[in-house]
Amino acid sequence: MMNQIFLSDMHSNLERMLKLQRQMSTGKLHQHPSDDPLAVGRELSLSTTIFENEQYLKNLDDGMMWLSNTDAALNQITDVIQRIRELAIYAGNGTFEETEYAAIAEELYQLQEELMNTANFSVEGRYLFSGLNATQRPFVRDANGKIIYMGNQLHVEYEVERGVMGQVSLHGREVFPIRYQQYTLASYEAPLSFSWTGRSEILQIRVGDRTAKVLIPEKWSDDDKDGVQEPSDENNFRDPGELVGYSLDELASLINESLAMGDVGKLVSVSVEKDYDRGVQRLVIKGHTGEPLSITSWPSPDFEPLPSDGTTGQPTDHSHIGLASYLGIETSLKSVEFPMGQDIDPTNSPIYWRLESGGNFAEVRIDGGPALS
């Protein structure tokens, strides 16, 4: 009996010694989460908090550097504008000779160049006044010598604590506002929980005579995101329940960053305005050039042949509602694509359209001809 007690105590002491040796050699109090789940959870949470705080401090340093350089650039711009004002007053003297006016004009041109160079100031390759398009030189001269703004109208922001963003930049239109008509399209109000789960489609954005297109691909997940392995997982097909959807913020980022079918950022800026008190948000698209702005959307050209009368069957993706139409920002409409030579017979099943704009509407009935193109 005594031997058993002695051996048990010795074994316990040996286990404690081995545990202490492991802790000393690894520098870790717990080797596995199962050693003490609550303590390990607190340690992981503390590690995450420390990492986040380090990132917030870095963000604060970057933000302060951005603000400091912006302040220096604005002070220099103010000095140049003050000199331009002095020259404007000085040039009001009606007794000057033509050569003196020419000298003033030359100095004004040089001051304009200095102003543009200051407005194009960059830090570590990022331009201060280009909005979020920080790699784009904000102010350039066109072929006619006119200075034009090439940035967008968004702001650089840093997260300074969890869920708190701090704006640290001004875009070029705020520094040098000009009097021009800005065209803006604002969507219907959507709840803050809005998620767009439509099919793949293309948005065409037209500003003046320039266009750019954005592909918004269908967003879905083919894995076992619910933690339950199902036959439809990892089969490379979109099955019911696998749609993920886009938030309005994700849609705005997708449109702003689109380059594949034209640089959208040169034509418009897309942002999301949120009203947390009312629990709503809306998508806002602002043109850059003061020219008319229009939006058109249509499904990706995934054609499925229609029945002969064109009305009794299901057209391609009949349940699909275009994103622009759903949000109320579509300014023109396109049909689904038909192959060349495809005819529609509305003799027995007439086609009926109702076109609405604001409080006005028109109704169209098409019921003639056995083979309408």
Image (cartoon, rainbow, N blue to C red):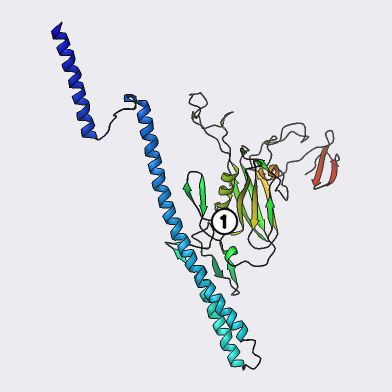
Identified by mark 1, the residue type is Leu
Q: Is residue 285 left or right of residue 257?
A: right
Q: Is residue 8 left or right of residue 100?
A: left
Which residue is most to the left? Answer: 3
Whether 99 is drawn above or below 123: the answer is below
Whether 69 is drawn above or below 213: the answer is below
Residue 172 % position (x, y)? 57, 64
Q: Is residue 102 left or right of residue 19?
A: right
User: Between 150 and 160, which is closer to the camera in this rendering?
Assistant: 160
User: Between 65 and 345, which is closer to the camera in this rendering?
Assistant: 65
User: Between 44 and 197, which is closer to the camera in this rendering?
Assistant: 44
Mark 1 surroundings within 10 Å by alpha-carbon count, few (fewer than 14), some (14 through 19), many (20 or more): some
x 69%, y 42%: residue: 326
Residue 10 % position (x, y)? 16, 17
x 59%, y 88%: residue: 102
Total numbered circles: 1
Whether 284 is drawn above or below 29: the answer is below
Q: Which quadrant of the figure has residue 217?
A: top right
x 49%, y 68%: residue: 73
User: Between 113 and 336, which is closer to the camera in this rendering?
Assistant: 113
x 56%, y 88%: residue: 103
Dot 1 falls on a residue whose secondary structure is: loop
Residue 1 % position (x, y)? 15, 5
Q: Is residue 348 left or right of residue 18?
A: right
